Image: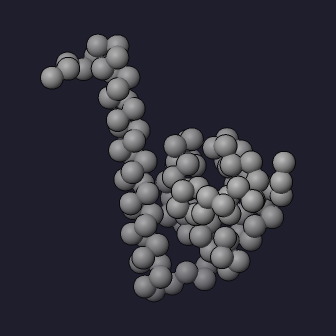
Amino acid sequence: MGTPVSTIRNLGPAMDAACAKAGIPDAETLRELGPDAAYEQLLHHGTRPHFIGYYVLVMGLQGRPWNDCKGDEKKALRARFDAIKARAKSDTDSAFERMMNAIGVINRP
């Protein structure tokens, strides 16, 4: 096992636990994935979407204070966050629909 996720600026023990649950065992893996893929993976494993949590992760991976995100940069991060959240929801909805189809709850066209 590599370096704990909590060694990255802004990230603490709660992020260690969330990342471990999502199959991101260490800081090296988190850096390799990058903030967008890592955050999407966190959402797929039960993390509730929250914009501040996302941009704290982005800032941390850049070595910046969590509250350093402002103006146009923050607006751009919000658009990225919204896209990640929409993809994760779409994937979840699709999985749910597949499960419902498999057990015959939803009529197949």
Residue 9 in percent (x, y) is at 74, 71
**What colouring does the structure picture have?**
one colour
Outermost residue toward the left?
A: 109
Q: Quadrant of residue 64?
A: bottom right
Residue 61 in percent (x, y) is at 66, 70
Residue 15 in percent (x, y) is at 70, 54
The reply, left or right, for residue 17 in relation to residue 108 is: right
Outermost residue toward the front?
A: 32
* Closer to us: 33 or 63: 33
Outermost residue toward the top?
A: 104
Look at 57% across and 49% down and name the residue there: 42
* Closer to us: 82 or 48: 82
Above or below residue 53? Residue 73 is below
* Closer to us: 81 or 14: 81
Look at 42% across and 54% down and name the residue there: 85
Residue 33 in percent (x, y) is at 61, 58
Look at 42% across and 76% down and name the residue there: 76
| Residue 65 in view (yes/no) | no
Look at 43% across and 67% down and name the residue there: 80
| Residue 19 in view (yes/no) | yes
Question: What is the tally of numbered marks visible in this picture?
Answer: 0
Above or below residue 68? Residue 109 is above
Above or below residue 83? Residue 69 is below
The reply, left or right, for residue 75 in relation to residue 97 is: right
Quadrant (top left, top right, bottom left, bottom right) of the C terminus? top left
Q: Quadrant of residue 28?
A: bottom right
* Closer to us: 53 or 84: 84
The reply, left or right, for residue 25 in relation to residue 102 is: right
